[in-house]
Image (cartoon, rainbow, N blue to C red):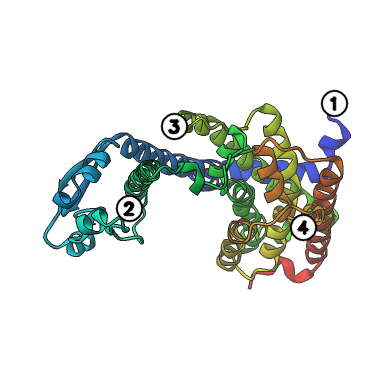
Amino acid sequence: MKSPAMKSPIWTIFRKEVLENLRDRKTVMNALIVGPLLGPVLFAVMISTVLTREMGRADKPLELPVIGAEQAPNLVAFIGTRNIKIEDGPEDPVAAIKSQDEEVILRIGKDYAKSWGEGEPAEVELIYDGSRQDTEQSRRRVEDALKAYEQQVGALRLISRGVSPLVVRPLSIVDRDQASDVARGAQFLAFLPYMLILGAFMGGMYLAIDTTAGERERQSLEPLLATPVPRGQIMLGKLSATSAFAIGSLLLTLVAFAVLLPQLPLTKLGLKFNLGPSVFLQLLLALAPVILLASSLQTLIAANAKSYREAQSWLGLFTMVPLIPTMIMMVVPVKTQLWMFAVPLLAQHHAIMRLVRAEGINGTEWAMLIGSGLAIAGIAAAITARIYHRESLAVSA
C-alpha cells in the first residue's frame, strides 16, 4: 500500500519531471556529468600542471647569462654554488629578454672593480621582464644569491675593521607562521566556493527551463494546470525535481573534488586538504539553502520568460551570480563578520573557506546561514507560486 506522501500530487509531479528529464540524454549530460565534473577536472589539471612545472624548475640548475663576468670573478663563483649555471651573456640583453630567449640576465658594470676596491657599492643589473609570470622564480633565485653574497662580504668587511657584524643588525626577526598545513593548502582552493555554488546552480537550471518554458512551448503545461491539483502544489513538485537535480550535481562535484584533490602534488610541499567525511557533510549543509534559493529563482525566471530561448539566455546570465562574492573576497579580503552569514552566497563563501581551513563554524553562524537562506528561498518560492496562478502562464508567446 502506498503511503499518503506517495499519493501526493507534489510527489507525482516530482516523479514525472525527474523521470522525463532522466530520459533526456542532453539534460543528464549537462546537469549530472559535464557540469559537475568539468570544473573539478580542469581545476585539478591546471593546479597539477603549474605545481609540477614550478617544482621541476626549482630543482633544475638555473641557466644565467652574465655580462661582464670578468669584472667580478668571486661574485660569479659564489653564484655558481647556488645551483645556478653561469653562461656568457648576449650582445643585446634587452632584445634577448623581449624575444624571450632569456628570462633573467645579470650585467656587471665596467666600474665594478673600481667601486669594489674603494669600498663603495658596486653596481650590478638584473635585466628581466616583470610582466612575464615565468620570470619571477628565476629572478628571485638570482636576487637571493646576490643578497647572500652581499651579506657575506659585508660581514667580512666589518670583521676586518674590528666591528661585529651584529652591529648592523639591530633586530633579530623570528618568523612564527601560525598557518597550518591545512590552511596553507586552502590557499589553492580560493575558487572552490564558486565551483561548488556553480554546481548547485547548473544542476537544476536545465530542469527549471524545461519544466516551465519548455512545457509551455510543447503545450503540455496547459493540460497540467487545468487539473484540479492546486497550482501551488504543481509548482512545489516542479521545484522539488529541480532541487533534486541540483543536489545530484552538487554531490558529484564534491565527490570529484574529494577524489581529485588528494592526487595533486601539493603533499610534496607539505600541504594538506581538509575534505574528510565530516567536512563533506557540513559542506552539503552549508549549500542546502543555496540549492533551494537557486532552484526557486531559476523556476521564477523560467516562468517569467516568454520562450525557451529567452529562459536560457536569462538563466545563462544568472549563473554568473555565484562568481560575485568569490571575486569580491579575492580583490578585497576582509575579516569574516557575523552579519555576513545572513547574506546568501557570501555566507556560503565564508563557510566553505572556514571548513576547508579546518576552522569551526559556531551555532549562531550556522543558524544565520541556514535561517536566512531558507527564508529568502521561501520568499522566492512564494513569488513563483503567485506566478503559477496567472492564467497567462500556460500561454506560449
| Secondary structure found at label 1 | loop
Q: Earlier in the sequence, mark 4 or mark 2?
A: 2
Residue 184, given in percent of the width and then of the height, sits at: 57, 39
Residue lying at 83% horizontally and 38% vertically, measured from the top left: 7
The disc labelled 2 sits on which kind of residue?
Thr
| Secondary structure found at label 3 | helix
Question: Which callout, 4 or 1, points to the residue nearer the camera?
Answer: 4
Question: Which callout, 4 or 2, points to the residue nearer the camera?
Answer: 2
Q: Label 2 vs label 1: CA separation?
A: 71 Å
Q: Nearer the viewer, residue 239 or 368?
A: 368
Q: Earlier in the sequence, mark 3 or mark 2?
A: 2
Q: Label 1 vs label 3: CA separation?
A: 54 Å
- CB-based contact (under 8 Å), mark 4 and mark 1: no
Q: Earlier in the sequence, mark 4 or mark 1?
A: 1
The disc labelled 3 sits on which kind of residue?
Pro
Q: Nearer the viewer, residue 43 or 67?
A: 67
Question: Which callout, 2 or 1, points to the residue nearer the camera?
Answer: 2
The disc labelled 4 sits on which kind of residue?
Val
Question: Which callout, 3 or 2, points to the residue nearer the camera?
Answer: 2
In the image, taking residue 109 as reference, residue 52 lies left or right, namely right
Q: Which residue is mark 3?
A: 265
Q: Which residue is mark 2?
A: 135
Q: Earlier in the sequence, mark 3 or mark 4?
A: 3
| Secondary structure found at label 4 | loop
Q: Nearer the viewer, residue 90 or 241?
A: 90
Q: Which residue is mark 4?
A: 343
Q: Which residue is mark 1?
A: 1
Position above or below: 251 against 107: above
Q: Label 4 vs label 2: CA separation?
A: 41 Å
Residue 164, given in percent of the width and then of the height, sits at: 46, 41
Residue lying at 65% horizontally and 68% vertically, measured from the top left: 305
